[in-house]
């Protein structure tokens, strides 16, 4: 668990390459079941998407490539973002519909990732707004949601609202642990001006 926390901190501070290297060097069969979803999350966030698939596919799918009856919503959500990253966007969207977004708000964020990849930005606005407003997410996850909301606003050319969100995010990302997110914010700023 400590390793997972350390790797998460590295990603948040913009040090992605060491996380990628650690993830791809793991023996996936040695990862305890209770940690597989968290390691798969680190895998896709570090760019090791195929490693994430190797970690979660045996947990999510049965031998007949059907959804296992005992898969947890958290595992399914992480599997769906991996599907999206691999290009199986429609499958990911279908599986995300099986998850209650009130109980598992991350499904809203990951659904928006799917829609982003299909250039359906306007459809992400309500999803991301609900995600940001959820009381069940961390402050860091809220900033992640706001940055994605800002990206959607920029894409649909709602410059006025985007400007307000951008100003909020400048304050939200002042913490040193938000360096990677601050970089994303600077990138979006170039599209605003």
Image: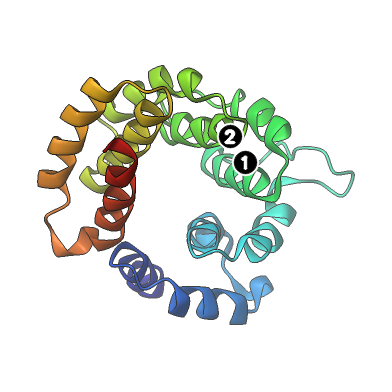
Residue 66: name its quadrant. top right
Residue 97: name its quadrant. top right
How many neighbours does mark 1 have within 10 angstroms: few (below 14), some (14-19), or many (20 or more)?
Answer: many
**Going from the N terminus, do you reach mark 2 or mark 1 first?**
1
Q: Residue at x 53, y 30 (%)?
A: 111
Label 2 SS: helix
Where 121 falls versus 58 (above or below)? above
Residue toward you, 27 or 124 = 124
Q: Total label count? A: 2
How many neighbours does mark 2 have within 10 angstroms: few (below 14), some (14-19), or many (20 or more)?
Answer: many
Q: Are marks 2 and 1 in contact (CB under 8 Å)?
A: yes
Q: Residue at x 64, y 29 (%)?
A: 93
- Residue 144 x/y as whole percent: 32, 44
Where 131 falls versus 64 (above or below)? above
Q: Which residue is mark 2?
A: 114
Q: Which residue is mark 1?
A: 80
Residue toward you, 27 or 156 = 156
- Residue 130 x/y as whole percent: 34, 21
């Amino acid at each position: 668990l400590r390793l997972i926390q350390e790797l998460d901190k590295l990603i948040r501070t913009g040090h992605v390459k060491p996380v990628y290297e650690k993830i791809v060097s793991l023996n996936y069969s040695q990862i305890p079941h209770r940690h597989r979803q968290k390691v798969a999350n680190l895998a896709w966030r570090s760019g090791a998407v195929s490693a994430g698939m190797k970690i979660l596919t045996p947990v999510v799918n049965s031998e007949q490539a059907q959804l296992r009856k005992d898969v947890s919503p958290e595992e399914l959500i992480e599997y769906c973002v991996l599907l999206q990253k691999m290009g199986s966007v429609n499958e990911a969207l279908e599986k995300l519909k099986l998850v209650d977004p009130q109980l598992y708000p991350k499904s809203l964020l990951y659904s928006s990732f799917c829609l982003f990849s299909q250039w359906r930005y306007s459809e992400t606005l309500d999803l991301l707004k609900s995600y940001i407003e959820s009381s069940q997410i961390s402050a860091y996850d809220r900033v992640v949601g706001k940055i994605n909301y800002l990206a959607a606003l920029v894409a649909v050319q709602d410059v006025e609202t985007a400007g307000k969100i951008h100003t909020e995010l400048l304050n939200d990302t002042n913490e040193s642990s938000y360096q990677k997110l601050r970089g994303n914010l600077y990138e979006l700023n170039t599209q605003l001006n």
